[in-house]
C-alpha cells in the first residue's frame, strides 16, 4: 500500500494586493496503518492542506501524490474520479442529507459510483450494524443523536472502501463519550484495516489515538512529533 505524499506544496488565494498565502511550502507523508493529526491555529492552512490531500484543490507549486497517483495537472474530471475512488471525507457538522434515511445517506454515494441499488442497500445496512446503528437504519438524521450522526457520517465516508480517510474536526461537535467512540472507529480504520487516516483537530482528547502529529503555523510545518507511543490497538 502506498502513502499520501505532499511535497513542498505552495498555495495562495487571490492575486496582487488580495493575495493570501495559505501554504508556503509544506511537506508531509501520511502512511497506511497510521493516524496522522494536523494541528495549528485558525488560519494556519489546515483546511487548505486537507483539501490538497483530498484532491479538492491542486497546489500552485509542489506536488501531491495520493497512493501513487499525482494530482498535479489532472483534469477536473480525473480529480473527481480520484476523490470518488480513493477519499473518504468526514466533516465536523456531519454533512448528512436530512431528507434521506440513515441507510440512504450511505447508499446515495454508492449509487453515484455505479453500485446497483440492492447491493448499495446491503452494504449500507452492514455498515450500520458494524457501527452499532442497525436499529436506526430507517431514521432520518434529525432523529439521531450527535454521536450517532457522526458514526453515520463515518460509515458513509468509508462505504466505497477508500484507502484514505480525511476528517476535519470530526469530534468537535461531540461529547467526550461519543468523541471517544468516533476516535476509536477512526483509529481502527487505520490500524486494523490499514487505511491512511488524517485528522485536522484542536481536540486534545484525540492525542492518545494518534501516531504522528504535525503542527502548522502560517502555512509552514513548525513541528513534527511521533510516533508518540508504541503502536497498538488500544
Ligand atoms: P477551520 O475551522 O477548519 O479552520 P475556517 O473557518 O478557517 O476553517 O474556514 C472554513 C472554510 O472557509 C475553508 O474551507 C475556507 O475555504 C473558507 N475560508 C476561510 N477563510 C476564508 C477567507 N478569508 N475568504 C474566503 N473563504 C475563506
Ligand atoms: P485553517 O483551516 O488552519 O483555519 P485555512 O486553510 O482555512 O486555515 O486558511 C489559510 C489561510 O487562507 C487563511 O489566511 C484564510 O483566511 C485564507 N483562505 C482560506 N480559504 C480562502 C479562500 N477561499 N479565499 C481567500 N482566502 C482564503
Image (cartoon, rainbow, N blue to C red):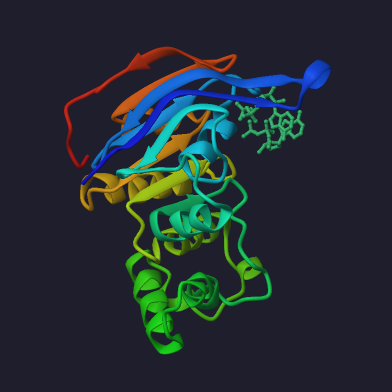
Give the image location of residue 151, x and y in percent. Answer: 46, 58
**Label tally:** 0
Q: In the image as oriented, which residue stretches furthest toward the bottom?
A: 118
Q: In the image as oriented, which residue stretches furthest toward the right?
A: 17
Q: In the image as oriented, which residue stretches furthest toward the top?
A: 222
Give the image location of residue 125, x and y in percent. Answer: 40, 78
Work out whether 201 lies above or below 101.
above
Give the image location of residue 67, x and y in percent. Answer: 31, 45
- Position of the C terminus, as image quadrant, is top left
Instruction: Choose top left, top right, bottom left or bottom right for residue 17.
Output: top right
Front residue of this view, candidates 111 and 228: 111
Work out whether 117 lies above or below 203.
below
* Residue under the image location 65 percent in, 23 percent down: 43
Q: Is residue 51 visible?
A: yes
Direction from residue 211 to residue 135 in the image, left or right: right
Front residue of this view, candidates 222 and 131: 222
| Quarter holding ligand 2 | top right
Work out whether 120 lies above or below 131.
below
Instruction: Choose top left, top right, bottom left or bottom right for residue 191.
Output: top left
Give the image location of residue 4, x and y in percent. Answer: 34, 38
Front residue of this view, candidates 10 and 54: 10
* Residue under the image location 38 percent in, 66 percent down: 132
Q: Is residue 171 visible?
A: no
* Residue under the image location 28 percent in, 45 percent down: 190
Work out whether 224 lies above or below 134.
above
* Residue under the image location 56 percent in, 18 percent down: 219
Amino acid at each position: 500500500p502506498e502513502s499520501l505524499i505532499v511535497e513542498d506544496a505552495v498555495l495562495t488565494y487571490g492575486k496582487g494586493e488580495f493575495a493570501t498565502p495559505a501554504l508556503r511550502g509544506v511537506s508531509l507523508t501520511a502512511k497506511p496503518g497510521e493516524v496522522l493529526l494536523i494541528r495549528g491555529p485558525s488560519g494556519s492552512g489546515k483546511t487548505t492542506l486537507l483539501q490538497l490531500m483530498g484532491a479538492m484543490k491542486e497546489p500552485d507549486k509542489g506536488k501531491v501524490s495520493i497512493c501513487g497517483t499525482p494530482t498535479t495537472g489532472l483534469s477536473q474530471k480525473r480529480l473527481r474520479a480520484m476523490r470518488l475512488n480513493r477519499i473518504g471525507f468526514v466533516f465536523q457538522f456531519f454533512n448528512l442529507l436530512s431528507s434521506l434515511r440513515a441507510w440512504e445517506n450511505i447508499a446515495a454515494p454508492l449509487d453515484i459510483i455505479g453500485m446497483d441499488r440492492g447491493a448499495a442497500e446491503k452494504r449500507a445496512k452492514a455498515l450500520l450494524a458494524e457501527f452499532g446503528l442497525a436499529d436506526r437504519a430507517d431514521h432520518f438524521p434529525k432523529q439521531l443523536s450527535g454521536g450517532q450522526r457522526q458514526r453515520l457520517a463515518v460509515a458513509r465516508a468509508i462505504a466505497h472502501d477508500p484507502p484514505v480517510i480525511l476528517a476535519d474536526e470530526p469530534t468537535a461537535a461531540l461529547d467526550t463519550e461519543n468523541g471517544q467512540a468516533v476516535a476509536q472507529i477512526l483509529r481502527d480504520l487505520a490500524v486494523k484495516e490499514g487505511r491512511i487516516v488524517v485528522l485536522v483537530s484542536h481536540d486534545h482528547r484525540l492525542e492518545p489515538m494518534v501516531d504522528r502529529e504535525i503542527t502548522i503555523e502560517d502555512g509552514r510545518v513548525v513541528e513534527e512529533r511521533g510516533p508518540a507511543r508504541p503502536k497498538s490497538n488500544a
